[in-house]
Amino acid sequence: MAACANHNPSNEEGGMPLSEEHPQGQHLYTVIGLHSLHGDPKSPMEWMQRMAREVGIEHNTRLVAPCAPARDGGVGWGDSYQWFPYREDDVDAPSWVELLPDNQWNMLRDQRHRLSKLLTAELDRLPRNGRLLL
């Protein structure tokens, strides 16, 4: 598995890299950003940092960006970070999700379970008056 950009290897949630930034002040907010197909955690970390600065909460905000597994991205992409393998032959079809084989549904379910555990852990970290943005 390829490493995600800007991740903290000491905090690999569920065996998968997790990029994070801890608040500099009192922890009041957590922002969890999910990257898109072929993206990596660097993408959401940059917009989360900018958003926290723009609304004035950068010193009180924990930023978290879980990394999707590195998978074969298909012809021309090489390895990329994908939550599950996307079908190349029907990606533009409106019902392409219905066409996924069982093993790909299982991969999607595994990632959904992993993200649910992360969400629970991050909610537990927040103070009683804290807020989470996903």
Image: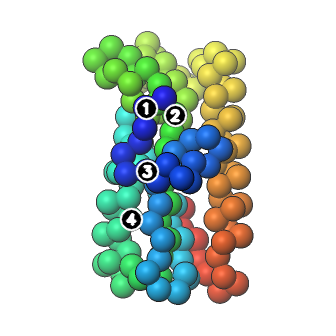
Specify few, some or many for label 4: CA neighbours under 10 Å numbering under 14, 14-19, or 20 or more. many
Quickly name the residue at label 3: 7
Q: CA distance from mark 4 to mark 1?
A: 23 Å
101 to 116, vertically: above or below? above
Disc 4 or disc 1, which is closer to the eye? 1
Give me the C-alpha separation between circle 1 and circle 3.
11 Å
Q: Identify the residue at image location x=69%, y=51%.
A: 116
Q: Nearer the viewer, mark 2 or mark 3?
A: 3
Mark 1 secondary-structure assignment: loop
Q: Mark 2 sits on what residue?
A: 69
Q: Are marks 2 and 3 in contact (CB under 8 Å)?
A: no
The mark that comes first in sequence, 1 or 3, is 1
Q: Which residue is mark 4?
A: 48
Residue at the location (69% across, 26% down)?
A: 106
Amino acid found under the numbered disc labelled 3: His
CA neighbours of label 2 inside 10 A, class few (<14), some (14 to 19), many (20+): many
Q: Is residue 129 above or below residue 20?
A: below
Image location (x, y in percent) of residue 76: 28, 17
Q: Classify the position of the C terminus by image quarter.
A: bottom right
Return the mark for residue 2.
Answer: 1
Measured in 3D between alpha carbons, the distance from the residue under mark 2 to the one under mark 3, in whole angstroms, is: 13 Å
